Amino acid sequence: MAESLLLEIILEGSNALGNRDYHSFFEELLSVYWLRPETALWRSIDIQTTSTFNFNAPSLEIGCGDGIFSFIRGGGRFDISFDAFQSIKNPDLDYYFKGKDIFDSFTKHSNPIVIRKPEYFIDCGLDYKKNLLKKARSLGLYKKLVLGDANKVLPFEDNYFKSIFSNIIYWLNSPADVFREINRILYPGGRCLVVLPNSNFLEYSFYYQHYLKKNNSRFNFLEKLDRGRIKDNLKHAKSGREWEKIIKSSGLKILSHEAYLSKTVIQIWDIGLRPIFPLLYRMVQNIKREELLKIKKEWIKTFKMFLEPIFLADKILNNNEEPAFHCFILTK
């Protein structure tokens, strides 16, 4: 019974993929984020859900970070020796459970080996962290990178960009202000893609549900697991109607709205290999290159076996529970 249900889930997920090879996206993400496979799971579903959105020039990504997600979404591929963790400094790992952003560093090891370039360029990437922009520059995806704070007035002309993408609006102080800025700089008839958390996202977090909400000291260890993600970074989680109201008040129009990311996926991501990541990273550093690549290939094969069916089945794993994220495509 269990085996037939799993086969049914895989087939339904596969049929929903259309002509796009989401298996290759998943495998590439799993290779880049191999020590944090739960990140690959989430990002693969992001790519699947946002697949109808095209970057038409001039284009902008607000909160581009290190650019790896957009690089892979665009069809770019890395040599298997590359991963997202190469620039981490060992002293940073000592502060991992205190909320240290271990990705916000840049070293000589930050230069990736690109074996296939993306199918398109993004004209401009905006982020407030210098080191992340340095990493993004090495990908060759962005024609221009701008250091800037999206909480402030965006440093771009009115009615300029024909396509805008952002997955960080819920981290910012005032989403309403950001949407007004997007409306200002978006070309009439242009399109904007945003992903935003649903109000139930917090309920799917072990830290929020068992410790922050109930103030149960028995679960205070979850504070180390969360590492400030919810308490300090996730500033806005709203229902679809609430987000629609904020978006429309900015003058933008909604072309499409899709809810995605099941509770199952969010709870896998919420813990994943997060608790043991510093140990995994230190172990990896002590393995010779040839042996490491051999282990990595086997690692990817193993996690693909268990996580790919879940990735393909995200839309039918919700049962009666709402998905945890919204995907909006907007226009002006």
Image: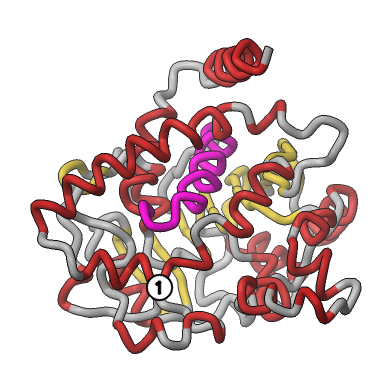
Q: Residue at the spot x=48%, y=81% of the render?
A: 96
**Residue 19, horizontal then vertical, whole percent:** 44, 17
Magenta-drawn stretch, dominant element (helix, strand or loop):
helix
Q: Which residue is mark 1?
A: 278
From the viewer's perspective, tell me whether residue 253 is left or right of residue 58: right
- Front-most of residues 162 and 144: 144
Q: Residue at the spot x=71%, y=63% of the render?
A: 179
- Front-most of residues 307 and 184: 307
Give the residues drawn in magenta, as a range: 33-51
**Residue 236, horizontal then vertical, whole percent:** 77, 68
- Tally of numbered discs: 1
- Front-most of residues 263 and 138: 263
Q: Quadrant of residue 92?
A: bottom left
Label 1 crowd bin: few (<14), some (14–19), many (20+), radius 10 Å: some
* SS category of the residue bearing label 1: helix
Q: Quadrant of residue 28?
A: top left
* Residue 98 in view, yes or no: yes
Q: Residue at the spot x=33%, y=81% of the render?
A: 105
* Residue 177 in view, yes or no: no
Label 1 sits on what residue type? Pro
**Residue 191, horizontal then vertical, whole percent:** 59, 45
Q: Which quarter of the rendering shows the N terminus?
A: top right
Would you place residue 267 above or below residue 225 in this image?
above
Q: Residue at the spot x=33%, y=62% of the render?
A: 84
